[in-house]
Amino acid sequence: MLYRKTAALALLALTLLAAPGPAQDFKLEEGFTRLDNGKDLEGWEGKLDGWSVVEGAIHLDSKKAKGDIYHKTAHGKNAVIRLQFRAAKKADSGVYIWGNQLQVRDYPTAGPSQYAKPAKPAGEWNDLEWDITDGVAVVKLNGEVIEKAWKIGKDEKKGVGLQKESGDFDFRYIRLLEKK
């Protein structure tokens, strides 16, 4: 009897370990280029201290980080940028598009209030998208429009940037599609 229980528990543990997790479920959409590789910070520049890759995501340790990071790949005025982010409770960061920053936060507790409704609570993954046409983006949070005419910055040589501000953050599946 004890052998059967032990064998059943071992089989259950192996099944759970072999089950595909969210990172294994990710499929890159056709035409997109992934900017993060899920392994290291290759392709990123800036003040890399305090930034690392943990469980496939770019992790910001806000106590150790010295500054912002940017991807070396720049994009045009007509592009789609998608990513996922996860904020610690009350955390505040940002994503730069050509040098202009969209505040990325634990929206339900840190605001702005107009972004709180579609946002997931601290510790959960949120989907964020910029659909940019002629330098103006429609920004969606978890599929809901939060900005109808958000203007990207003016520095066309800057790639997507991640801001160091307050609280820990994770960013993953950062991807880019150049519109034709």
Image (cartoon, rainbow, N blue to C red):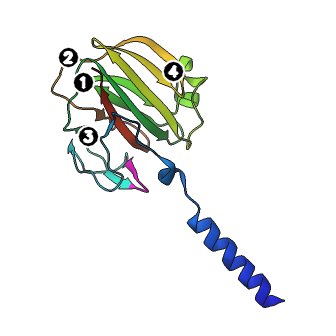
Q: Marks 4 and 2, Cα distance to the nearest angstrom? A: 24 Å
Disc on res. 168: none
Magenta-highlighted stretch: main secondary structure? Answer: strand
Instruction: Name the spot of residue 42 as percent of width and height, x first.
Output: 23, 50
- On whether residue 57 falls in the magenta region, the answer is yes
- The residue depicted at 33 percent of the width and 56 percent of the height is 39
Q: Marks 1 and 3, Cα distance to the nearest angstrom? A: 14 Å
- Amino acid at the residue labelled 1: Gly
- Amino acid at the residue labelled 4: Pro
Disc on res. 99: 1
As drawn, 102 above or below 60: above
Is there CB contact under 8 Å for labels 2 and 1? yes
Q: Is residue 172 left or right of residue 142?
A: left
Q: Is residue 144 left or right of residue 42?
A: right
As drawn, 106 above or below 19: above
Residue picked out by circle 2? 154
Instruction: Name the spot of residue 13 as percent of width and height, x first.
Output: 65, 72
- Local secondary structure at mark 4: loop
Badge 2: how crowded within 10 Å, few (<14), some, or many (20+)?
A: few
Disc on res. 112: 4
As drawn, 131 above or below 1: above
Badge 4: how crowded within 10 Å, few (<14), some, or many (20+)?
A: few
Is there CB contact under 8 Å for labels 1 and 3? no
Instruction: Name the spot of residue 91 as percent of width and height, x first.
Output: 47, 37
Q: In terms of image quadrants, where is residue 47?
A: top left
Mark 4 or 1: in front is 1
Instruction: Report the magenta residues as a range.
Output: 54-61
Q: Nearer the viewer, residue 65 or 39?
A: 39
